[in-house]
Image (spheres, grey):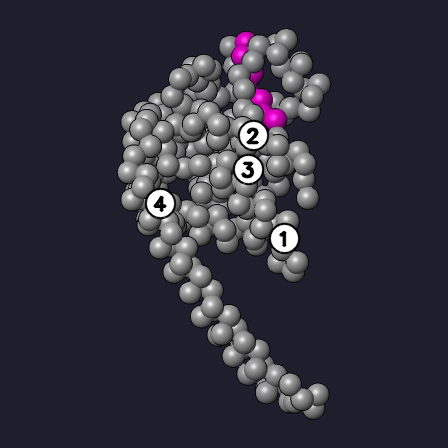
Amino acid sequence: MAADASPADALAALRREIDALDEAMLALIDRRVAAVMNIAKIKATDGDRLRLRPAREAAVVERLVARAKVAPDGVVRHIWREIMAACLELQITGELVVHAANEPALLTDAMRQRFGSSAAMTIASSATDALAAARTREAVAVIELTPDSNWWNGLGGDPMLAMFECLRDPAGRALGIAVGRIAGEDLQACPEIAIVDDAGLAERRARGAELLASNDGLHLCVSAAPAQQGGR
């Protein structure tokens, strides 16, 4: 562009560049969708587990965050989580089942930040109902957490359901827990959310774990996922 180009000409040129970039991005998205549809044909079923793969998501997002030169980390994470959520929905219809009695708007916003806006949202009248949906449907239960909540007490050692994500508000305060039928190998890339007794809590706190809730002599705590521990 000529050095003496007017602001209007410069703006028009930048808009043409953006239009061209949009066309190129759409072509790549089309290719990604086609690949996802081919995966769906190969993976006709995942048995008793969800199609959601937190380990794969984390690997994709952190790799792209590390490669970004201009885009902020949060922008990269948001865009690719939306892309992955939309592509997952093309493979199988999923559901986000929410129970929140105190701060439903905050928890819903945090849930959409983590899981995207493609999956349908269902409101559960109780934590028990939300967990039942996660146990029997292609669904993730997103349940509000308070310091004295006790809905999580019975999940220790559950062979089907795993607590795999701690959802937070913009200030970092824990709002709720995501629970689903996540395969064991995928949990390795997730925050470690554990139910422990007093001794176990002391040991984990010494290693930097965060206490989320306590009830009936048991404690719910979370440790950062490996990618978060490494940081960028």
116 to the left or right of 173: left
Give the labeled residue for mark 4: 39
User: Which amino acid is tagged 1?
Assistant: Arg
Q: Callout 4: 10 Å neighbours few (<14), some, many (20+)?
A: few
Q: Which residues are magenta?
A: 217-223
Q: Callout 3: 10 Å neighbours few (<14), some, many (20+)?
A: some
With respect to residue 27, does 101 lie above or below? above
First in residue order: circle 4 vs circle 2: 4
Which percent across, then down, holds residue 187?
50, 28
Q: CA distance from mark 4 to mark 1?
A: 26 Å
Q: Is residue 126 visible?
A: no
User: Which amino acid is tagged 3?
Assistant: Arg
Q: Nearer the viewer, mark 4 or mark 2?
A: 4
Q: CA distance from mark 4 to mark 2?
A: 27 Å
Q: CA distance from mark 2 to mark 1?
A: 23 Å
Look at the numbered disc 4 and give the secondary structure of its residue.
helix
Q: CA distance from mark 4 to mark 3?
A: 32 Å
Give the labeled residue for mark 1: 67
